[in-house]
Image: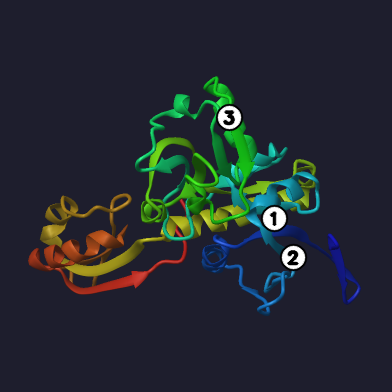
Amino acid sequence: MLSTILDDNKVINQLKLGLPKGSLEQATFMLMKRAGFNFSRSERSYFPVSDDEELVSAMIRAQEIAGYVANGVFDAGITGKDWIMENNANVVEITELKYSKQSMKPVQWVVAVPFDSEIKSVKDLQGKRIATELVETTKRYLASNDVEAEVLFSWGATEVKAPVLADAIVEVTETGRSLKANNLKIIDTILTSTPRLIANPESLQDPWKKSKIDRMALLIEGAINATSRVGLKFNLPADKIEIIKEVLPAMKNPTISSLLDEKWVALEIIVDEAKVRKLIPEIKRLGGSDIIEYPLNKVIY
């Protein structure tokens, strides 16, 4: 991948970006689209094409992205805090991106054992076998608790390996449903992880690349801030302004505009979507009319 291309005799700077393939793939592409970066690719392609000619990207497993960013193969990438720690990667975390494959909640790496296991705490793992994909982090966790155990790398389907192939597992979970479905219970949490936009330290020394990464971070953060929020516009009798302020859960004071009829004003707020079902009837009760709800793509603080 080249950092520059020639287009009609002019040089176009390009940023090499690593995007996660797998569980975060769909959520990441949806987030990037809301941020204003549209990617298209064929089903078998690992090199998405962006409508931003300054981006050249490749898709690989999230587990590998931090290493490639650290080595300079990518200038920047999106991967989980867990894989940054696992690879002990020398990267710069630009911003935390609070989203996951199913929700906006972080994921957790937990120690889980069968429901009928005698293992109740980390100390009970002494001399046991533990299956996990997060090998190095698990070893550090055990060492911090003065526990010696055999840590086995798991290639997948980790939930089914206890108790036959391992005494315990360290596995990532978002809801815990898969663990329960496999008759497992959580005895401890090793770490909580969210995706991060990361950058290669040397790439950040390049003024153009640093500016591009910072601008991308701003737009992605704006897209995340807009998730689960909507805008509301409505008209209200002017003498009800102070009353309506008491019930509006706006980010700040509402925007208030005058109308041709001086007895009325127009208000505009941004609000959590979950609150709208209670808020709109309350606005209507207090005399509001012409209520409009609209979606948001970005909220920049």
> Which residue is at 35% across, 61% downward?
229
Question: Looking at this view, is 174 or 125 the one in front?
Answer: 125
Q: Position of residue 288 (x, y in %)?
A: 15, 68
* Discs 2, 1 touching: Cβ within 8 Å: yes
How has the structure been colored for display? rainbow
CA gap between label 2 and label 1 equals 9 Å
* Residue 283 vertical position relative to residue 243 in the rendered view, above or below: below
Q: Residue at x 58, y 35 (%)?
A: 138
Label 2 sits on residue: 54
Give the quadrant of residue 204.
top right
Q: Which residue is mark 1?
A: 212
Contact (CB < 8 A) between labels 1 and 3? Answer: no
Which of the pair 257/85 is nearer the observer? 85
For the residue labelled by badge 2, is the local secondary structure a helix, a strand or a loop?
loop
State the mark number for residue 149. 3
**Visible residue check, residue 186:** yes
Give the amino acid at mark 1.
Answer: Lys
Who comes first in sequence, dot 2 or dot 1?
A: 2
**Foreground label between 3 and 2:** 3
Q: CA distance from mark 1 to mark 3?
A: 45 Å
Asked whether residue 269 appears in the rendered view, the answer is: no
Left or right: where does residue 289 sit relative to residue 140? left
